[in-house]
Image: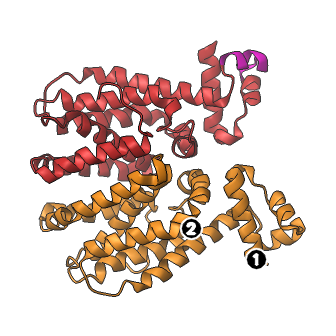
Chain colours: A orange, B red
Amino acid sequence: MRLRLYRTAVDLIRQRGYEGATLRDVAAAARVSPALLYRYFPNKRAVVLAFYDELSETFERRSASLEPGGRWRDRFAIALDLTLEVLGPHRVVLRALVPIMIGDPDEGVLAPETAFSRVRVMNVFERVVIEASDAPKGLAPALGRVLYLAHLGVILWWLLDRSPRQRATMALVALIRQMLPSAALALKLRSVRGFVQSADGLFREGLLGGATHRGS
Amino acid sequence: MRLRLYRTAVDLIRQRGYEGATLRDVAAAARVSPALLYRYFPNKRAVVLAFYDELSETFERRSASLEPGGRWRDRFAIALDLTLEVLGPHRVVLRALVPIMIGDPDEGVLAPETAFSRVRVMNVFERVVIEASDAPKGLAPALGRVLYLAHLGVILWWLLDRSPRQRATMALVALIRQMLPSAALALKLRSVRGFVQSADGLFREGLLGGATHRGS
């Protein structure tokens, strides 16, 4: 029942946008009483959190195929492809949720309330670097989190992309992949390593609100 | 009259958010009839566009003090500081408008409808590079637009920043400034120059919807 109500709600958000889809409409579409719906989803936020949960769980499960070993840059490219593969079928509803995901201080992808799903994905990106054969010493978790932030940027680009079939995003990902060897080389420089450390610290302080992070 | 109604509308968006502020409330707060208000602002979108127009005009006017000469990286740092200075007093209302600015396909900062204000600001960033004493040959306008995109990223970071008095944003700007000499050096490499050209092309194709750009 919960799954059926959830799918109906996500469907309605896709069709009408977040503001346009009311829980009352969801109940009507699912042919249940509002009271029953509220027992599973007391508000729209609960639907959004369930959606994050579903997507992050799928991403985590599928990234399990990423066994330890290999260069971090190749592993990052794989994780980035996997992200777009997992999110791909949901682009229309994600597009409708952009105002919430970015703008909402409670339901946004960086909000404390959504930490569970976020940490799940962030951990994958940390592992991408930590378990690489060329993990930079003393810098691996920080680099993983900076790559996580970069991956959020790519997702936002993809959602805003107006080119046919998001061709520009695919080209951007190819471009990033092409630049990664230079980035890996630059990491030999002390100044660039310091940049990654600082960027990670500021990301956690500024965008995650100074939340201490599990496993870091 | 127009200015008074505009200021009342922006005030109300600041207090109640974009969804929460209705034009009817604005008319009541300004003690005019809704009919009179609609003559100046037929909808909330008109208020948002006027807001972009005001901010971009102030930024353009104040950036006129940036006379030709000097290194592009110093000029970019000045333009970035100027951005935060101009937007600073409006942070609360801009925060309330994030869902619109990022998420709305019609009123967003990258939408065709807002091109007038956007091009005004983008032109300043193009001039930042073009009129620099060390403008990279054949790459100046493209680099200017990539810096414009980077500046949008900094603004978004600043709006989402949860640290006290946006300390993390100030530190990020300092960090960027510290990395710029390395970035300028990297521009000597053909691969990095190609990266800037490609990033600019994808930005225009993907995020600006392939709109041809004045003066490029």
Q: Which residue is disc 2 drawn over? A: A114
Quadrant hosting residue A136: bottom left
Q: Is residue A113 above or below residue A93?
A: below
Q: Residue at x 10, y 34 (%)?
A: B134
The image position of residue B11, as x and y in percent, is: 62, 31
Q: Main secondary structure of the magenta part?
A: helix
Callout 2: helix, strand or loop? helix
> Toward which corner of the image does residue A100 lie, by quadrant?
bottom right
Left or right for B76, reference A96: left
Mark 1 vs mark 2, foreground winner is: 1
Q: Residue drawn 26% across and 75% down? A: A72
**Callout 1: 10 Å neighbours few (<14), some, many (20+)?**
few
Q: Residue B95 — which label?
A: none
Chain designation of label 1:
A
Q: Which residues are magenta?
A: B30-40
| Residue B157 coordinates in the image, percent (x, y) | 41, 50
Q: Secondary structure at mark 1?
A: helix
Whether residue B150 can be seen here: no
Q: Chain of mark 2?
A: A
Q: Which mark is residue A2?
A: 1
Could you say which is closer to the camera, residue B32 or residue A31? A31
For the N terminus of chain B, give its image quadrant.
Answer: top right
Quadrant hosting residue B150: top left
Give the residue type that dot 1 points to.
Answer: Arg
Expressed as whole percent of the image width and height from the top left, the position of residue B97 reads 56, 40
Q: Can residue A38 be seen at all in this image of the molecule?
A: yes
The C terminus of chain B appears in which quarter of the rendering? top left
Above-or-below relation of B19 to B113:
below
Comes first in the chain, label 1 or label 2: 1
